[in-house]
């Protein structure tokens, strides 16, 4: 007795299945293309930077344009000064302690000096004042000013 399989007796729609297989193969080739993979790997740092800036702009205590200036001022005073000239005071956007060379609370510029009262040379050489170069400490880093 011969056993017949009902699925084998049906005629196959070969044109439809072969077209589906061709489309799937073409899609697979495009997805695994070496050029596409290289482009995706090269775009990863730019994508990461864009996401980081977007998160910072949303979570910063400053307005978005001020937060952007604050990020740019982190690079250097020259780049921030090209957008909005300084000085930037402590607590304001654009102030970073590493850009404050003299430690007076003003970064990327100087304030007008306060008029000092003339003092005698004895007062300047008082034993209460430290002798030697001025020093300033930021975190664990120590900066000495000649």
Image: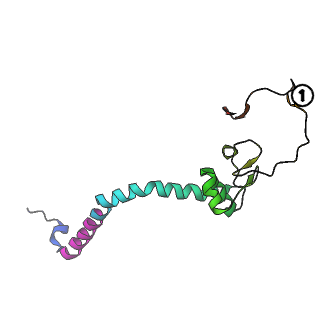
Which residue occupies the extreme top position in the image?
A: 127
Picture residue at 59% right of the left edge, 51% below the top? 75
Front residue of 87/97: it is: 87
Would residue 32 be seen by someone viewing this image from the given angle?
no
- Left or right relative to 77: residue 47: left
In this view, 130 is above or below 57: above
In this view, 76 is above or below 1: above
Picture residue at 15% right of the left edge, 71% below the top? 9
Q: Residues within 10 Å of mark 1 (few under 14, many from 20)?
A: few
Q: Position of residue 93 (x, y in %)?
A: 71, 55
Q: Secondary structure at mark 1?
A: helix
How many labels were placed on the picture?
1
Q: Which residues are magenta?
A: 13-28
Q: Position of residue 77 (x, y in %)?
A: 64, 52
**Residue annotated with mark 1:** 122
Front residue of 7/42: it is: 42
Picture residue at 16% right of the left edge, 65% below the top? 5
Tell me which secondary structure the magenta stretch mostly adopts.
helix
Front residue of 11/100: it is: 100
């Amino acid at each position: 007795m011969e056993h017949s399989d009902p699925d084998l007796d049906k005629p196959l729609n070969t044109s439809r299945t072969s077209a589906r297989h061709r489309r799937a193969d073409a899609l697979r080739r495009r997805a695994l293309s070496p050029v596409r993979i290289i482009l995706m790997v090269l775009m990863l740092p730019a994508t990461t930077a864009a996401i980081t800036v977007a998160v910072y702009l949303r979570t910063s205590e400053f307005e978005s344009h001020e937060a952007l200036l604050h990020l740019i001022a982190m690079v250097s005073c020259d780049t921030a000064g090209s957008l909005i000239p300084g000085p930037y005071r402590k607590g304001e956007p654009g102030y970073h302690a590493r850009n404050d060379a003299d430690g007076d609370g003003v970064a990327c510029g100087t304030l007008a000096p306060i008029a000092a009262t003339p003092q005698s040379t004895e007062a300047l050489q008082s034993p209460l004042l430290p002798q030697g170069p001025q020093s300033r400490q930021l975190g664990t880093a120590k900066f000495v000013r000649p």
